[in-house]
Each structure stands twice: as C-alpha cells, then as structure tokens.
Amino acid sequence: MTATNEATFSSLAAPATASAIALYARPSEDFSTKLDATIELLKAAAEDHGGRIVQATSLGAEDMVITDLIARLGLDVAIGTLETGKLHAQTLALIPRIEQRYELPVERYLPREEQVVHFVRKNGEDAMYASLELRKGCCQIRKMEPLGRMLDGRTAWITGLRREQSNNRGTVAFIESEPTGRTKLNPLADWTWNDVWHYIAQHDVPYNPLHDEFMPSIGCEPCTRAIAVGEDFRAGRWWWEDEAAKECGLHVKKADPVAA
C-alpha cells in the first residue's frame, strides 16, 4: 500500500457511525487544478463525440461525481449502468435518485436472462467462490455482455477509474484508445479519494450509503465486503482471490470489452 493510501485509511479507526464525508472530505492542494482539467476533458469529449458517448457508471462515489458534473455542465453524455441482478439494494436505490435529482434518464443494461438461468443451474448461485474461471464467467454474463450492448454504436465512454484505486490501475491514463478505435476517458485519473469526497460534500452529491460502512469499492453483493484498517481500496472486492486477478474484465486492456 502506498503512503497516500495508508494515510487515507488510517481514518478507518473512526467510529462506525461516522459518514464517509466526515472521514474523507479533504481536498488535495491542487484540487482546483484537477477539477478544472476534469471539466475541460468532459466538455471536449462531449463536443467531439456528440450523442455517441456514454458514462458507464457503477454508481460508486467516483461515478456519482462524474454524473453530477455531466448534469451541472449540461453535457450531451448518456448515463448507463449495468444492473447485474446481484447489486445491493442500496446501489439500485441510486438510480431513481439520479433521475429525480438531475432529471436525466439512466440506461439500464441487464444480463440475458437465459444465460443467467443456464449458468446458475449448471454452477449454482455461489459459483463465483468456487474458482477464478467461474467468477469470471459470472462477470462475463452479468457485466461484460451487457457492457457490449451499452457501448454498441458509441465512439467513447467515460469511467471513474483512478490511479489510487489499485496497483493494476496505478498508471491509468486520462484518455485511452481501444482496439476498436473507441475512446475511453478516465477524467478522475489523478483524483485522490479525499478529492472525491470533498467534491461530494461541496455539491451535496447523492452517494451509496454503503460507503459509510467502509466499502470504498462496491460491486455485486456476493463479491463485496467492507475493508479493514490498512487494506487497499479494492481489498473488499473478490477478497478470496489473488490481488493480480481482481478485475472483472471491464477495464482489462488486452481485450476489448465488446469482444471479450
């Protein structure tokens, strides 16, 4: 773990009743510069890809910041999410909150029902714990295939990836070009966790209450747990697996998400 992460998560010793805002909302010295750069990147992307760009939101804190910026700036960017069938109720509750707060529709992409039924009948509801292969198979059905439909016909997509999130994401660029020619934008790449919560506090951005329960990275319910003092951001995701395997495939460069 980096020194920055250690400092960030030293505050996890605080009482369990403390909110994520109270624990983390402390901007870095250059926060204003980062915010300006993020705004310029989003504006340019919306202009360059008018009507053909989507924010793929996981409904986590970072993505809520991006959604707020899209709405605040009035950008022509669609908002889409992967409704995997295994999300926490608290996560799903954010969808209508977004639509009511920002008056923007959220596109919902569900897995193919027949594929889910076949997978569960063959491997069981808890197959993700049995092997890495089965866990990735579950992710393929519930996340990768729906993502392909979300990105179909789009020339760019926006994510909430940050370099601080994990070693695997430590060099993530602001703009990436995928094998298909589609552009992937990571406008918060250099933001800290504290920056994210500072923005949320400043603008009263809705967020998943599970963040208040020490879940910085929230995915499907069976694959997410709270983290302990000193653990990395994504330690609560697929915690039973080796660190190097902890990606579902959405952000793995060696395979285009539509073709994977």
Image (cartoon, grey):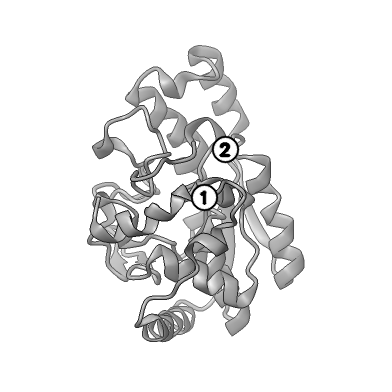
Label for residue 149? 1
Residue 53 visible? The answer is: no
Neighbourhood count class around disc 2 (C-alpha, 10 Å): few under 14, some 14–19, many 20 upward:
many
Q: Is residue 36 above or below residue 203?
A: below
The residue that mark 2 highlights is 111
Residue situated in front as seen by the camera: 176 or 229: 229
Three-letter code, disc 2: Pro
Q: Furthest-right residue in view?
A: 100
Quarter residue 74 falls in:
bottom right
> In the picture provided, is 167 more to the left or to the right than 148?
left
Neighbourhood count class around disc 1 (C-alpha, 10 Å): few under 14, some 14–19, many 20 upward:
some
In the rendered image, residue 241, in percent from the top left (x then y), is placed at 32, 29
Q: Secondary structure at mark 2?
A: loop
Three-letter code, disc 1: Arg
Quarter residue 51 falls in:
bottom right
Query: Which residue is located at x 67 percent, y 55 percent?
Result: 94
